[in-house]
Image: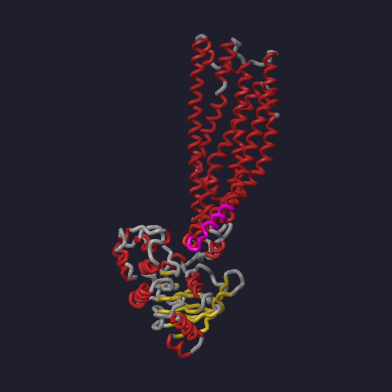
Amino acid sequence: MKTEQNITFRGIVREHLSGAKWSLLAAGVSLLGFTVTELIAPWPLKIIFDHILLGSPVTGLMVRLNCLNWMLAQGKTTAVVALSLMIVLVAAVRGAFLYVHAFVTSRVGHELVYRLRGELFAHLQQLSLSFHARTRTGELLTKVVSDTSALKDVFAESALNFASHLLTVSAMFVVMFYLNWRLALVALMSFPVVCYALVTLYRRIKFSTRRQRAREGAVASRIHDALTALPLVRAFARERHEQERFDFESSHLLEEGVRAARLEAAASRAIEIISAAGLCSVVLVGAKQVIAGRMLPGELLIFTAYLNSMYKPLRVLARISTQYSKAMASAERITEIFSIEPETKDDHQGMRVDGLRGEIAFDRVSFDYGDGKGVLRNVSFTVKAGQRVALVGASGAGKSTIASLLLRFYEPQSGEILIDGRKLREYERESLRNQIGVVLQDSILFGASVRENIAYGKVHATDEEIETASREAHAHDFIAELPEGYETILGERGSTLSGGQRQRLCLARALLKRPSILLLDEPTSAVDAESSALIQQTIQRSLAGKTILLISHQFAGIESFDQILVLKNGELVECGTHSQLVARQGVYFDLLSYGATSHAA
């Protein structure tokens, strides 16, 4: 993973291509060999037509070819057979060079995309949660998968193949000028027209493909939103509505795709007509010179063969321009992601930790999510090592934000957060998080085995450790009843389990790490009474001596906590034990009374 702040698309491409210099050298050698064989290909036919069928004497540089003189001396039949076999041999050698070139360039392209995709995914994981909160997941999926794949076409095929075509065309023009410079100028006249047509159409194709990539991202986002909310869609009978929204986005993508295809087809047809006109001019002028005796028929054959070979890549350029347009549009979208820097970074001398006492201190901490609305304002409190502390308050009071700051998902605008007397930003972020266990309100599980989900934070955990953590979280019994026990594959996001079972698996996952600090964010808010009681038992018994920070709307089980922090509108308004806060009859008392009334209702 890159550590530089200025990661750019061009930088990654340049770095990878510099590491693939031997592959590029092999591609260059094969390209040179292909060019030579492409130049040689029409010459056996020229010799057959001019020097065997018409009996014209050998002149110019061909006089120095001893093998040619030897073949002609063996008789016409032998020479025709030898030259015919040479056509096959040249085609075979050209095919071998083309195979090597295609294989090597394709591998370079695939490796480039592999590296770029890995860099992009790693960078996305380092971006702040606020970025992910305001960015649609489908759009990011399109950039990671589709946009990176679009680059393969231009680097593995279009760019290097264009270099091949350019070298071949240049070499052919040299030979053509050597044979007949007047006819070569006639052939050259059509190329400016071709280039103008390509540039004009390319600009329109680029604009269309840029919009097409944006539409693809919108369609992917619509699919992701609908499928992830499918239970809600069906519960409200909104399938038709979602289908209409999808059709609306998909129809725009269809329009842009058709527009791009139309422009590509127009470019191909324009090139075909211009190339036909150029070939017509060469045949007319060349045929007059042959009739006048200033040129041999075989030389005109070489001209027409070369022109067909040169116009072929020009026809392909229309398709290449579309691929290049898509690749550049994709590159721009990828560069936008790379230009966003992670909001939290480790200090260069970040301290690695292997264990913590668990003392937490907030010193006049203030924070907002960039909208100017203070979520926390001058919050100060201290949690001693081994204490159990509950954070309570109405929704939006700032409880979960405290947990996010402690995990360094965000950095406070002012104030300091300390663990064991050391500023939080002085710790190495990864090792710090390894010492903090987390159970979120939203039970996040993967579509993998139960064992893999529990061992997510400690991948090398033994079976005994996994089972012990499961028993502590009161999850072992229901796991044992699953079809394949710990090897049972869960549905996406744990959909095949109940809410209580999912939460107990998440608790087992946190306990397996043996963390110094445990953050519990509403662990019993969405579970049944039995699961809630079991989770509370775990907090009371299995986590004795651990620093626990419990975020809760429910007050059952927190009466015995060492400290209760009461938040209101981003401020810490009360602090004390349950009995102290009840006796004070302040905000906590009101919350407690309201909770009891709601429960009774």
Q: Residue at horizontal 59%, vertical 39%?
A: 320
Residue 27 point in image, percent of width and height = 51, 36
Residue 83 point in image, percent of width and height = 51, 17
Q: Label the magenta part by its dominant secondary structure.
A: helix
Q: Nearer the viewer, residue 593 or 328?
A: 593
Q: Quadrant of residue 570?
A: bottom right
Q: Nearer the viewer, residue 2 or 268?
A: 268
The residues colored magenta run: 234-248
Q: Nearer the viewer, residue 346 or 254?
A: 254
Seen in the picture, residue 103 relative to 60 is either above or below; the reply is below
Q: Quadrant of residue 185?
A: top right
Q: Is residue 506 visible?
A: yes
Looking at the image, residue 276 sits to the left or right of residue 364; the answer is right
Is residue 239 located in the magenta-colored stretch of the structure?
Answer: yes
Seen in the picture, residue 577 relative to 463 is either above or below; the reply is below
Is residue 334 located in the magenta-colored stretch of the structure?
Answer: no
Q: Residue at horizontal 61%, vertical 33%?
A: 315
Q: Quadrant of residue 311?
A: top right
Seen in the picture, residue 535 relative to 178 is either above or below; the reply is below
